[in-house]
Image: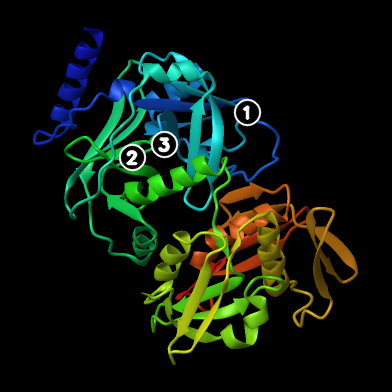
Amino acid sequence: MKNLFVLCIIFASITAKSQDTSPPHIDLFKSVLTIVTQEPDNCTSITDTTRDIPDINDLVEVMDSTKAYELGTGILYKYKGKKYIITCQHILYKAGRIIGFDSNYEGYELKLVGTDMFYDVAVLEFECSDNEAHFKSMSFGTPKTENDEVWSIGYWKWNGEPSIESGNMIDCIELADLHFTEMGYIKSDAQTAGGFSGGPLLNKKGKVIGMNTCLNRKSKASYALKSERLKKLVHNIIENDGSIQRVYVGLRFSQDATCGKVKIDDIIADSPAAKYSKQLENRYIKSINETPVCNIYDVLMKMEDMKAGERITIEFKNSDRISFTTNRLDKKSLQNIALHAVQKYYKDPNDKKRKRTKVKIDEGQIVVIHAGEKDIIKTAGIDEDRIYCLDGPAQLGILIRLFGLHGYIELGKDDEHIFINQMNFSKEHNKRVLYY
């Protein structure tokens, strides 16, 4: 009776907000968790120290009551007979203890299975497997057409009501929107806020068509990772003991958005592609493994679906072909990406010709030597509003891959750190790059 009463309250509140819409009929009470992280560790992993908590009384009340360092939402998902919780990676940064709360705010200890920084996905499981029986997994569906009505589900309010925002799927218009939608995100005008990250985006049938990931604060548009891509990533994480498998070839692909052409414009040393550098560099691509390449996202989607050890065949505009075997993107590969990028793009204002600057990996850190002085890269920031702590060059490699789609890397230096200052659009603002 309690659940029925609360559900009636939810329906009434949503109806009052929008007279012609109501949330789909599903058992949210057993399928959605509020995810709380407590007791943050020291900065030993990739960390976004921007804590953007809007002035929302419901959210503040929940965070204060649960002693949350960060708060989000989780989706119950069943895979091969076991129930997992899917959420966003960014809410788990610096997490020591992870707790999932149901609608009654009974807490369940959770532990991390694995994450994918590139798509901001994390997979959790119950510390005690017996707790799986208390919850029901959600059904997944496929997004249909633009303007379809959708519902975004967030954290549980302290009174036992879920946070729900309704809206519609909308077309992408701006270049920034294109980046997200081409990477596999749904754009909607369901106005999510802090605490919705990791929650489900539902269609009229109550099926999960995406996972809430981020919000454009200027346009108020929300983005949710599509269910198809989300499931592939989750399966990859689970099947590979928490360490997602991707291919590595040692290439940097680039696209000039003005002309639309995609080419290979850089090759990393000691990579599978290195021995073919003369045949590969600065050549325009026609297809990869028979799949036509029209833009940088065609490359991304093809590479994301490949498996390590698989052969890659790149066909160029003149119909020449190069074929070789891929490796797995492992820690060493990420170190090579980081070292290569820093060597090529580090900018010392006192060394414009770069004759005095050297970069190397020393004792697990990237060291920049310039003018006879040594500096260790300890942090990386994007557009001056996010700071990431690094415990090694492999994590810098993750950041470079993650933000490479947006442009060139520009490093800066202050009194304490060398850091990635921004993605440089000043000279070639229409150019997008991708490391694989």
The residue that mark 1 highlights is 96
Q: Position of residue 393 (x, y in %)?
A: 72, 56
In the rendered structure, the answer to whether residue 333 lies left or right of residue 154 reads right
The color scheme shown is: rainbow
The kind of residue on which mark 1 rests is Gly
Rendered residue at 63%/76% (across/down):
267
Residue most toward the bottom?
A: 318
Q: Earlier in the sequence, mark 1 or mark 2?
A: 1
**Residue in front for this viewpoint, 286 or 428:** 286
Q: Residues within 10 Å of mark 1 (few under 14, many from 20)?
A: some
- Mark 3 vs mark 1, foreground winner is 1
Q: CA distance from mark 3 to mark 1?
A: 20 Å
Q: Position of residue 191 (x, y in %)?
A: 29, 42
Q: CA distance from mark 1 to mark 2?
A: 26 Å
Q: Confirm or deny contact between disc 1 and disc 2 (CB under 8 A).
A: no
The kind of residue on which mark 2 rests is Thr
The circle on residue 192 is 2
Q: Earlier in the sequence, mark 3 or mark 1?
A: 1
**Residue in front for this viewpoint, 47 or 340:** 340
- Is the N terminus in the top left, top right, bottom left or bottom right quadrant? top left
